[in-house]
């Protein structure tokens, strides 16, 4: 039992006063004269005993009466928990990730959770509600009702650790009062599982929402598997997280027009191919009908008119090998001698190759420095008898310099497979034994050695990178090196050029950092925007002379096909899809977590919380007891002889 006003309990010491008075009254005697004492002796003894008993009973009832009155004023009450342990502040985290689309016994898990919150939580109680993408601090469900009913799913869910940190940061840390965190989720299995390690002053209550079905089929990815001037073959990959399915229907639309249909049987994984015309602009949508999660039943992609990469070869050597690599279907290749170079050509290029120049004029050095600052790629191939001073005047801008030319045979034995040039789509596997190319002349490099893509047997770089500058430390002509006859020369020069213009992929994933280039020249105050029928946003963008580099992370928030626009002009289209990590409906076992309370529904949790914190007020009972003792005293005084 606890007391609202425990300081009034000191008044119980006052009960000693009537006890003292009563004891003094018992010691007082009054003499009465009787004519015949012997006749009344027996009656007198009986009356004295009865009187003493009556006085003791009266004293007891009065003490109990006064004690009940005092206790009633202290307002006693009982609870299942100590009132000091009752949380003074409540934060509710509501998981609104896509896995909550799954249906439970009473409908969609998220929608049912919202309805339960509205019906179970006191409408006027001050709470803080947190979701993956929103915070409603120190408010009430009465104020939040409409927003909760319209709450959408988050395409960028936080990790469990981030969710806990976000929720914990919203508590008032200026006091040491108990706090309560209610975490509502289906606790889908993630790379880093949910843990209950949190501030000891925070009482953690978990509500695990249970789906009735964990089967789900996801459109996982699409890629171009074959391509020729007439046709392009697309391969669509699907994943099944549940029971095997036969004859799953797949539709392919271009905008709103159905252009192909297929069916597959799927156990775990499946692939199917679609063939489309190569020269058509495709705003594609793959779709299936599945009773599981809905967000992964659609996959958007785009095939735009391909932009060509502008490559300029400034040469004093043989650049026939460059003409074979930079073919006209993907590149606009221009070759010009250093003596005939028109510097006005440089601004329009994406990649420039200095092919074995004997000398580099100061004016060209300054223009090339500005070119690389504007995002262009520069490939430097030195000559046998290069003007080292001129080369160093260029390389010094990248904190590197050439030493003297060394006449010594070396083999190129090391490939950096993690280098951006070779990281994707170059090697099916790492090759350990191959015919090593070799050189018989090379330049020692000092200062910044850059990021080596190819290295000699002694570890020194043969091909290295400084940001968007690629440097060979040896000439490539056949008198010095047999590198031109090595198969790796094609992907090396190809990737160095195409990286200067990051053309949009078939699609991008929402929530990841995506970067691509738009081949457009803008005026000074022009801004690129991305929009569709439902939303519009201005992405992060960096303007160069002949392109704009776009960076997206959190935007857009919904999947679909978007237009990239300069004012009202649509430059090209781009697609964004939701991350497929939540497609696998596997769930964490949270029953082993310690120092948490686990419930399987919101009503059951709040019933427990209400019963634990329910206050049973007892002052009315003590008032009744006081009245009862008053009546007993009156009856004793009136009827007890």
Image (cartoon, helix red, strand yellow):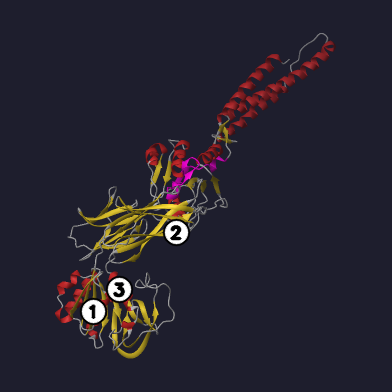
Counting the numbered discs, the total is 3
> Which residue is labeled 2 in the image?
270
**Residue at horizontal 26%, vertical 77%?**
324
Local crowd size for mark 2, using a 10 Å CA cut-off: few (<14), some (14–19), many (≥20)? some
The image shows residue 46 at horizontal and vertical percentages of: 79, 16
- Are the two marked residues, 2 and 3, in contact with CB atoms closer than 8 angstroms? no
Q: Let me know if residue 1 appears in the view.
A: yes
* In magenta stretch: residue 100: yes
**Residue at horizontal 66%, vertical 23%?**
61
> Which residue is labeled 3 in the image?
494
The first of marks 1 and 3 along the sequence is 1
Q: Residue furthest top?
A: 35
For label 1, the SS is strand
In which quadrant of the rendered image does the C terminus lie?
top right
The first of marks 2 and 3 along the sequence is 2
For label 3, the SS is helix
**Residue at horizontal 48%, vertical 37%?**
120
Q: CA distance from mark 2 to mark 3?
A: 32 Å
Task: Say above or below: 435 vs 208.
Answer: below
Tell me the magenta residue range. Answer: 81-108
> Which residue is labeled 1 in the image?
354
């Amino acid at each position: 039992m606890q007391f609202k006003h425990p300081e009034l309990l000191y008044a119980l010491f006052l009960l000693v006063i009537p006890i003292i008075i009563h004891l003094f009254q018992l010691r007082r005697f009054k003499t009465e004269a009787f004519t015949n004492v012997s006749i009344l002796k027996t009656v007198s003894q009986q009356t004295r005993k009865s009187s003493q008993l009556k006085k003791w009973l009266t004293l007891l009832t009065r003490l109990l009466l006064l004690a009940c009155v005092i206790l009633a004023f202290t307002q006693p009450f009982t609870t299942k928990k100590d009132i000091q342990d009752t949380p003074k502040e409540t934060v509710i985290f509501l998981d609104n990730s896509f896995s909550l689309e799954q249906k439970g016994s009473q409908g969609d898990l998220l929608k049912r959770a919202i309805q339960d919150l509205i019906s179970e939580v006191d409408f006027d109680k001050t709470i803080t509600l947190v979701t993956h993408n929103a915070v409603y601090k120190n408010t009430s469900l009465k104020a939040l009702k409409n927003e909760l009913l319209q709450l959408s799913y988050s395409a960028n869910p936080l990790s469990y650790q981030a969710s806990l940190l976000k929720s914990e940061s919203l508590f008032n840390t200026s006091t040491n009062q108990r706090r309560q965190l209610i975490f509502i989720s289906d606790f889908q299995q993630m790379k880093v599982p949910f843990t209950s390690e949190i501030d000891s002053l925070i009482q953690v209550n978990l509500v695990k929402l249970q789906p009735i079905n964990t089967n789900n089929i996801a459109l996982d990815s699409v890629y171009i598997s074959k391509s020729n001037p007439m046709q392009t073959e697309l391969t669509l990959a699907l994943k099944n997280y549940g029971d095997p399915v036969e004859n799953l229907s797949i539709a392919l639309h271009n905008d709103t027009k159905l252009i192909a249909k297929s069916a597959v049987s799927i156990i775990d994984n499946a692939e199917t191919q679609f063939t489309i015309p190569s020269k058509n602009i495709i705003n594609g949508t793959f779709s299936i009908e599945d009773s599981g999660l809905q967000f992964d039943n659609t996959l958007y992609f785009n095939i735009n008119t391909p932009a060509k990469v502008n490559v300029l070869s400034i040469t004093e050597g043989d650049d026939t090998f460059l003409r074979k690599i930079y073919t006209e279907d993907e590149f606009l290749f221009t070759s010009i001698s250093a003596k005939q170079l028109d510097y006005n050509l440089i601004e329009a290029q994406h990649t420039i190759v200095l092919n074995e120049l004997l000398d580099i004029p100061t004016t060209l050095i300054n223009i090339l420095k500005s070119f690389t600052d504007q995002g262009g790629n520069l490939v430097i191939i030195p000559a046998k008898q290069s003007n080292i001073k001129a080369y160093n005047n260029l390389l010094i801008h990248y904190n590197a310099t050439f030493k003297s030319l060394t006449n010594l045979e070396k083999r190129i034995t090391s490939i950096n497979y993690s280098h951006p040039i070779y990281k994707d789509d170059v090697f099916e596997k790492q090759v350990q034994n191959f015919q090593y190319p070799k050189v018989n002349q090379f330049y020692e490099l000092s200062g910044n050695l850059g990021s080596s893509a190819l290295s000699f047997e002694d570890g020194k770089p043969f091909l290295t990178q400084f940001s968007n500058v690629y440097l060979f430390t040896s000439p490539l002509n056949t008198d010095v090196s047999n590198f031109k006859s090595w198969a790796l020369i094609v992907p090396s020069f190809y990737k160095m050029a195409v990286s200067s213009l990051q053309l949009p992929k078939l699609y991008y994933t929402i929530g990841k950092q995506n970067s691509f280039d738009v081949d457009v020249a803008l005026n000074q105050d022009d801004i690129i925007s991305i929009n569709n029928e439902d939303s519009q946003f201005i992405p992060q963008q960096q303007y160069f002379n002949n392109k704009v580099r776009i960076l997206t992370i959190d935007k857009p928030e919904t999947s679909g096909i978007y237009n990239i626009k300069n004012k009202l002009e649509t430059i090209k289209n781009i697609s964004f899809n939701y991350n497929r990590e939540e497609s696998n409906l596997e769930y964490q076992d949270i029953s082993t977590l310690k120092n948490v309370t686990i419930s399987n529904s919101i009503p059951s949790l709040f019933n427990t919380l209400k019963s634990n914190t329910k206050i049973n007020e007892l002052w009315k009972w003590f008032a009744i007891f006081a009245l009862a003792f008053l009546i007993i005293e009156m009856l004793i005084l009136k009827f007890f002889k």
